[in-house]
Amino acid sequence: MKSARLVAVCRVQQLLPDSGPVGVTAIDKRPVVGPVRIRRLGLHGDVQADRANHGGENKAVYAYSEDDAGLWAGVLGREVPPGYFGENFRVAGLTASNAVIGERWRFPGGTVLEVTMPRVPCATFARRVGEDGWVKRFKASGLSGAYLRVITPGDVEAGEQFGVEHVPDHGVRVGEWLADPTRERAEALLDAEAEGTIRLAAEIRPYIDRVLGLEA
């Protein structure tokens, strides 16, 4: 089982004003000290201001990698500390953007999370970063990070090791799906679900339908 490290566990520090329709954003995540309980809808004490587009069972936890954050730091010319992209987990030893949809991560206390889909950038994220064309740049990069659902609730803590215990055979990775959602990849995901090897998130289905020309 491949081993990685949970560098930081982050949850909302404060709600910030935002010009979007909700009026505030919970993107300001900061590292916390000590064990944090993860339940079906995410970290205890965390908040999603725009629940129509963020959070829910299939987006309970958002993970981003140290290596991808380092790449962006070089591009942006500033630090990208844990939580800056609104992530709950900053991880090292694996690249969350390379996670295969449906793979599972197991933590020492028995918590199990399952990769569901990439983070799709939005206008709030662009305002947070303050870079022109950010949505387009982030999508094209494929450095998406990964959303995860909670299979087994439990406690996690920064500094602990965790492992990838299962990787489906279909091979579609979250970052490549965000950057280049091809027909071949869409069909691979649907085939894997039909075979019972993965359970697709409802939130990814409109993107699959769009690629396959199945939109109503």
Image (spheres, rainbow, N blue to C red):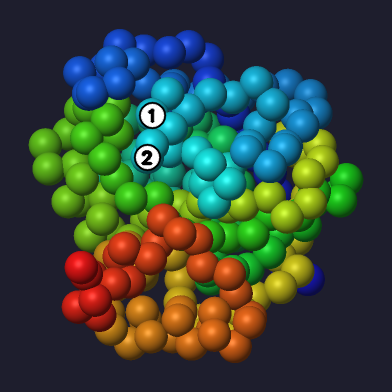
Kind of residue at badge 2: Asn
Q: What residue sits 37% from the left and 40% below the top?
A: 53
Can the viewer see residue 73 in this picture?
yes
Distance between mark 2 and mark 1 Cα atoms: 6 Å
Where does label 1 land, which residue? Answer: 50
For this rendering, which residue is in front, 153 or 10?
Answer: 153
Can the viewer see residue 63 in this picture?
no
Residue that extends furthest to the front in the rendered view of this protein:
216
Q: Quadrant of residue 8?
A: top right
Q: Is residue 174 above or below residue 78?
A: below
Query: Where's the C terminus, which quadrant?
Result: bottom left
Q: Is residue 198 above or below residue 78?
A: below
Where does label 2 land, which residue? Answer: 53
Q: Is residue 188 above or below residue 73?
A: below
For this rendering, which residue is in front, 118 or 3?
Answer: 118
State left or right for residue 178 relative to residue 127.
right
Q: What residue sits 32% from the left and 30% below the top?
A: 78
Mark 2 and 1 residues: CB-CB less than 8 Å, in contact? yes
Query: Where's the N terminus, which quadrant?
Result: bottom right
